[in-house]
Image (cartoon, helix red, strand yellow):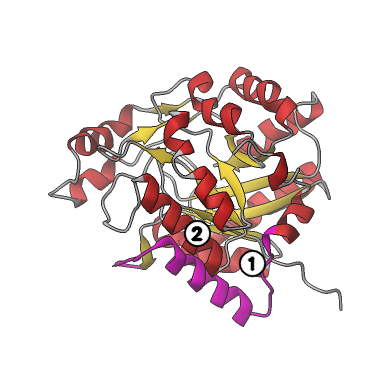
Amino acid sequence: MAKRPKTIITCAITGAIHTPTMSDALPYTAQDIASQAIAAAEAGAAILHLHARRPTDGGVSINPQDFAAFLPQVKQATGAVVNISTGGSLKNTIEERIAPALAFSPEMCSLNMGSMNFSFHPLAKRYDTWKFDWEKDYVENSDTYIFRNTFRDIANVANTLAPHAIKFEHECYDVGHLYNLRFCMDIGLFKAPIFIQFIFGILGGIGPEVDNLIFMKRTADRLFGDDYRWSVLGAGGAQMGLATTASQMGGNVRVGLEDSLQIARGQLATSNAQQVAKIRRIVEDLGCDIATPDEARDMLGLKGADKTAF
């Protein structure tokens, strides 16, 4: 019997687009982001997906100075792969969103593969108090937002960051995004092996059912053959169930407070590391080994931490 591939755990430490600070566990200061990222790596995360926030009010930041406040500390304290978001805020241009990646030339960046309605406005009815003044309006009005990722935007990101040899985490929220990615590969924007993050459970994207995971995986197999690696992100209460299923299908997993504030349905997580430890325990109990950061680098063809600019 062939040995099962090791499972890469990605941890998304603190969200920007869709995660207001509705849990005290969600970090927003540079020190808290660094501390939680380091703890997540120690718990078993090979890849750390990082956003920055304004330290004054927890709002979205794409200011490279806010990334600089924690990136060197994370690199020095862990061997983990650093993956910087290009998502930014739903109100930022693509040029603004890639500024941190241009400044720091990380090993990986996220890249959304299509424009979409991206809404989380139902959350507004679930909370009576908010930590910061901006949050309620931002959440309530998200039913008017379009997360813009046009073909020109995607090409802009690919061409601008090409000299940096960055591997993209191609975030696909629906099956059409897989076809977008195939087209982009056909015109030479991205080279194999690519890394796809299947995302389930965001309002505006595909739902968090196992049938949809199987459908997305079959479609990717048909479109990319052996030229891709894949991972699964389940939003909210779907996080652990879909991650467990993905690990048993030979895929990789993403957890973290960006994607879900819970450790179990109805129970808030105390940290990112708690989520990493839980999915690691599940994966290992079901007979899989987790990948180290260097093994993840080899599996994904990354340039190495020594070639980053932080």
Q: Is 292 within the magenta?
A: yes
Q: Where is residue 209 drawn, in percent x and y? A: 51, 58
Q: Is residue 167 above or below residue 218?
A: above
Q: Give the class, few, some or many, for how many residues have Cα within 10 Å of label 1's Cα (few <14, many ≥20).
A: many
Q: Which residue is mark 2?
A: 38
Q: At 77% from the left edge and 31% from the top edge, which residue is drawn?
A: 185
Q: Give the class, few, some or many, for how many residues have Cα within 10 Å of label 2's Cα (few <14, many ≥20).
A: many
- Whichever of callouts 1 and 2 sits on the residue coming sooner in the sequence is 2
State the extent of the magenta-drawn residues as a range.
Answer: 265-293
Q: Where is residue 88 drawn, in percent x and y? A: 45, 32
* Figure quadrant of residue 283: bottom right
Q: Which residue is mark 1?
A: 247
Q: At 34% from the left edge and 66% from the top edge, which residue is drawn?
A: 270
**Residue 149, labelled with which disc?**
none
Element type at mark 2: helix
Looking at the rendered structure, the kind of residue marked 1 is Ser
Q: Is residue 119 above or below residue 24?
A: above
Q: At 63% from the left edge and 19% from the top edge, which residue is drawn?
A: 156
* Figure quadrant of residue 149: top right
Q: Which quarter shows the C terminus?
A: top right
Q: Where is residue 139 drawn, in percent x and y? A: 27, 38
Q: Where is residue 218 drawn, in percent x and y? A: 72, 52
Q: At 35% from the left edge and 58% from the top edge, which residue is drawn?
A: 261
- Outermost residue, right side: 1
Looking at the rendered structure, the kind of residue marked 2 is Ile
Element type at mark 1: helix
Asked if residue 265 lies left or right of residue 205, the reply is: left
The one of 207 and 40 positioned closer to us in this rendering: 40
The answer to whether residue 114 is seen in the rendering is: yes
- Outermost residue, left side: 128
